[in-house]
Amino acid sequence: MPPAVAGIGLFVNATKVADLDRAKAETWPRLDSLLPAEARRYGTWEAVSGKAGGADFEIKKPGATYGALVPALYPSKSGKGISFGLFDPVDLAHKGEPKVSHDELAELRVVIDTSGGRGQNDHSGGDAVDPNTITLTIEAGGKTVDISGDKLLAIPRENAPDDPSGEHKGWTLGAILASQKIAMPKRALLTGDELNLTLEKEDLDPKTSIPFIKLNRQGALRFRTYKKQGEAWTAMGGDLRGLRKIQVLQ
């Protein structure tokens, strides 16, 4: 293996957009946060490629192949180089182990689709959020409690109802409320960055509906409602991005 490289070039298509050193890697930055704004939408990435440990690598269409994972840079274990990895969002927040990794980078390239079509509905563009800094507010029984990001991330997660593989993990609404010793309500109002969503009795019946919350690729909280269809669970309506408040109505 060649010696570790202290700094690397970061390219978008054929254009160098940054020179990255070990000090930058030690902040564990998300790769999209290092790119120009017009290149940050994960759905437009055709590939991530580069040289790592003396060998070429390529991950084609990472947004489709590893849809639940977050691309980031981090310090190589050698103590000198830079590594690239795809992380579960909670693992990245905890500076844990990546699901996919390439160590001792010599260069890194993001190939994007410049046609202006594919991936434009991907909501993972824009600024990323450190999940440790988010706050989820719960109002119930005349009391208000704020759950800080680190405490939320400490609540055990479970598989999304439609994903037995375990790639997509998060929390049921009931689990988050139970962490604060709050019973499942009959009605609730959820507040997101742009919209509010009222959950009625039928949305909160555990036999037919699972209200589910997870971190999206941007590090924000996304709420979905899963409904039982025969023996399977399917995401149906109740889609709220940037969840920040839960109000128990009944």
Image (cartoon, rainbow, N blue to C red):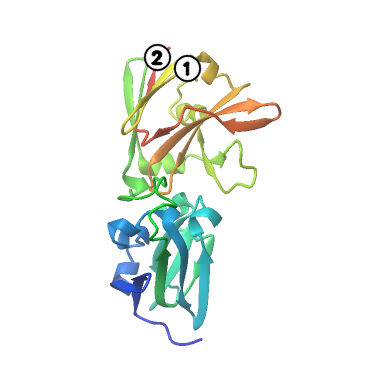
* Image quadrant in which you'd find residue 161: top right
Question: For the residue marked with disc 2, what is the amino acid?
Answer: Leu
Q: Quadrant of the C terminus?
A: top left
108 relative to 148, above or below: below
Mark 2–mark 1 CB contact (< 8 Å) = yes
Q: Is residue 82 left or right of residue 24?
A: right
123 relative to 78, above or below: above
Please indicate, yes or no, whether residue 30 appears anywhere in the rendered image: no
Residue 53 locus on image (x, y percent): 49, 80
Residue 190 locus on image (x, y percent): 38, 25
Residue 121 locus on image (x, y percent): 41, 45
Question: For the residue marked with disc 1, what is the amino acid?
Answer: Pro
Camera-nearest residue between 248 and 235: 235
Q: CA distance from mark 2 to mark 1?
A: 7 Å
* Image quadrant in which you'd find residue 233: top right
Instruction: List the residue tagged with mark 2.
Output: 249
Q: Residues within 10 Å of mark 1 (few under 14, many from 20)?
A: some
Instruction: List the residue tagged with mark 1.
Output: 185
User: In what element is the residue under mark 2?
Assistant: loop
User: In what element is the residue under mark 1?
Assistant: loop
Residue 4 locus on image (x, y percent): 42, 82
In the rendering, which numbered label is found on residue 227? none
19 relative to 92, above or below: below
